[in-house]
Image (spheres, rainbow, N blue to C red):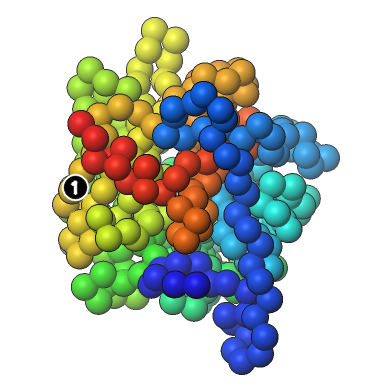
Amino acid sequence: MTRRSGDTPRAGDAQGAGPVPAPAPIPWEERPAGSTDVLWRSSRNPIIRRDQLPRSNSIFNSAVVPFGTGFAGVFRVDDRTRLMNLHAGRSRDGVAWRIDPDPIVFRPADDRAAEIQGAFEHAYDPRVTWLEDRYYVTWCNGYHGPTVGIGYTRDFDTFHQLDNAFLPFNRNGVLFPRRIGGAYGMLSRPSDAGHTAFGDIFWSESPDLVHWGRHRHVMAPVLWSWQSTKVGAGPTPIETPEGWLLLYHGVLTSCNGFVYSIGAALLDLEQPWKVVARARDYLLSPREPYEQVGDVPNVVFPCAALVHREADRLTIYYGGADTVVCIAHGHLSEVIRFAQSR
Ligand code: BMA
C-alpha cells in the first residue's frame, strides 16, 4: 500500500520487523441510490450516543485515527456537572467505541509544562495527528480562558502534555502531519473568552512544538454565506497532489443563533497559508434531527477524517448538535473536486 508522509501508521509500524497484521478497513457505506451528494451520512448515525458513559451528558466533537489493527481516539465528553474533558477510546471497526469512563490524565512532558497544569478549567474539541513517531493531541485547553493545548501519546494509555501553543484566547488548533519547510505547522483560530462571533484561520510554525511564530493569515469568513461569522480548521489536513485538503467549520448567524456547517478548501503544499481553492457551497450542513436537535441545535462540527487512498474513500467524524458523534462518507477525489468548485 502506498504511504504518504503524514499518513497515520498502520499496524506493525511501531513494532519494526515481523509480519504486519492487516489494518482494519475504515468505516464505509456506499452512496445511497439516487443521491448525488458529495458527502453522505452513515445510516448508523449517531454512532456514539450522549449517555454512552455513566456520567456523560454528551459525547461529540471527537478525533479518531487508525491504531494497531483497529482504531483509537480522543473523545470530548461533557459530564453531568457539564465539565468538558477528554477521554481515550478504542474500536475494532471505527463505529462501535469503548470509551474510558475516566478522563485522560496528562503527565507533564517537562517541569515547565507542569506549571500550566495547576488549576484545571476545561479541555475540549480534540484533534489527533500522527506526526513523525507518535500521536499528537491538540485541544482547546483552559488556561485563564481557552487556548490551544498540545500533548502526545504512543499507546492511548499514557498521555504527556507539552506547553500550550498560544496565549489565550485561541481555539481549533490543528497540526499538519509532517514538517513543512523544516518547521512544524499548526492552524488555529484566535478568539475571545465567550461564544466568539468572529474568527479567521491562521498558520503558525515551530521548530520544536513549543515555541510558535511566523503567524500568517490563511482564511477569513465570507460575507452573505454559510461561513459569514467565523471559520475554523477541522480534521488534520490531508495531503493530496492538489494541495492540503482542509475540511473546516464555517458559521452563519441566523435569527436562531449560530449554524455550523462543514466546508472544503485546498492549501498550498509548501506554503499552507496560501489558499489554492475554496468551495463556495457547504459540504454538509445540519439537516438530520441529530444535527438540528440537541444541547446546541444546528451544529455539524468535524474533528477527524479517515482516508483509504487506494479505494478513494474518505470518512469524516463530526459532532452533531453538541450532543453525539456522527460519520459521513465521500470519495476523496470528489471532495477535492468539490473544494475546487466555485
Ligand atoms: C464552539 C465550540 C464547539 C461547539 C460549537 C457549537 O465555540 O465550543 O465545541 O461545537 O461552539 O456550540
Under tag 1, what secondary structure?
Answer: strand
Q: Residue at the spot x=54%, y=35% of the render?
A: 31
Residue under the image location 73 percent in, 49 percent down: 97
Number of numbered tags placed on the structure image: 1
**Amino acid type of the residue tagged 1 in the rendering:** Val
How many residues crowd mark 1 within 10 Å: few (<14), some (14–19), many (20+)? Answer: some
What residue appears at the point 39 percent right and 70 percent down from the top-left corner?
4
Closer-to-camera residue (129/94): 94
**Is 198 placed above or below 75 here?**
above
Query: x, y percentage for residue 188?
Result: 33, 49
Q: Quadrant of residue 166?
A: bottom left
Q: Position of residue 185 (x, y in %)?
A: 30, 63
Q: Is mark 1 within 8 Å of ligand 1?
A: no
Q: Nearer the viewer, residue 19 or 244?
A: 19
Q: Quadrant of the C terminus?
A: top left
Q: Position of residue 321 (x, y in %)?
A: 57, 26
Res 26 seen here: yes
Q: Outermost residue, right direction?
A: 54
From the top left corner, tell me how far across and down residue 135 is, in percent: 53, 68
- Residue 169 appears in the rendering: no
Residue 159 vertical position relative to residue 142 in the rendered view, above or below: below
Residue occupying image coordinates x 57% and y 72% = 10
Query: Left or right: 124 with respect to 180?
Result: right
Classify residue 72 as left or right of residue 264: right
| Direction top: furthest residue | 255
Please name the residue that numbered disc 1 is placed on: 275
Determine whether, in the image, residue 98 is placed left or right of residue 235: right
Residue placed furthest toward the bottom: 17
